Image (tube, grey):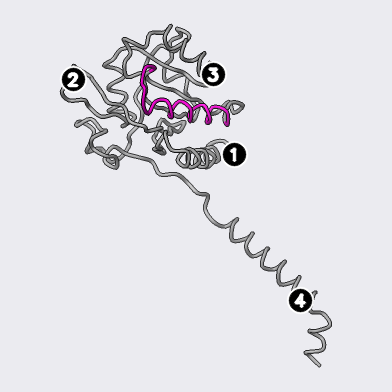
Amino acid sequence: MSMDIFSKYRRFFILLGLVSLIIILLFYEALLPPKKLPVFQPAMVNFELVDSTMQHVKKFHRVAEFELINQNGKTITHENFRGKIYIADFFFTTCPTICIAMTDNMLKIQKEVQNNPNILLISHSVTPKIDSVSQLKKYAIEKGVIDNKWHLVTGDKKEIYELARKSYLAVKDEGDGGPFDMIHTENFILVDPDKRIRGFYDGTDLKEIDRLLLELDILSSEYFNN
């Protein structure tokens, strides 16, 4: 008798089981804590990319205040990034190697975030004497940089060097070069509105760019979707 009832209402029981499973999964998803990105400290990063005075730091690391000049000759400081998520990198306009792919991939990111007022981009020249404002402007026009979204910056070489080594943990010390000479890496650095580093990505690798965009959404949810 019971088998007859099951056979008669088989579709109903299967549908009920599926609906119940979906409800359970939705409740489980709702109860999970929201995913958060790690907060990177100098002690967690390859020591070659970190100034010797910072390699021991295990907490409270933040990007330092700065004052640089962008492709439009405007002074750009940390205040321009207050309350924003931003992606930083280091490059130079005459670079014939990894900078080409890095710029192409930063352009892809720019396209994805161009209508999001909470996200900015900044690229620091590691050859600021060569990368004058006019040179940066020429490069920006050639590449399709959106001025209010992506700042290409030049300035005092010592300041850029210290930002790279002590704040963004992103370039190698050339060692045998002149004062503050540096070898930039392919790293893109994700920075949160509290000036903390939340991710490092290979700016020449499209899979890494996809990961950056995914984690950018996670970070945006942490700050702007509450």
Helix, strand or loop under label 1: loop
Mark 1 against mark 3, which lies toward the viewer? 3
Q: Which residue is mark 3?
A: 144
Check disc 2 and report the residue beneath it: 177
Q: Which residues are magenta?
A: 93-112
Mark 4 and mark 1 lie on one chain; the one further toward the N terminus is 4
Q: Residue at x 78, y 84 (%)?
A: 6
As drawn, 58 above or below 182: below
Q: Quadrant of the N terminus?
A: bottom right
Under circle 3, the secondary element is loop
What is the number of callouts on the image? 4
Residue shown at 45% from the left, 33% from the top: 192
Name which of mark 4 and mark 3 comes first in the sequence: 4
Please, is residue 34 above or below residue 76 in the view?
below
Horizontal relation, residue 220 to residue 101: left or right: right
Q: Secondary structure at mark 2?
A: loop
Residue at 43% x, 6% y is: 134
Q: Which residue is mark 1?
A: 225
Q: Quadrant of residue 100?
A: top left
Disc 2, disc 1: CB below 8 Å? no
Which callout, 1 or 3, points at the residue further toward the start of the chain?
Answer: 3
Relative image position of residue 163 (x, y in whole percent): 31, 23
Q: Main secondary structure of the magenta part?
A: helix
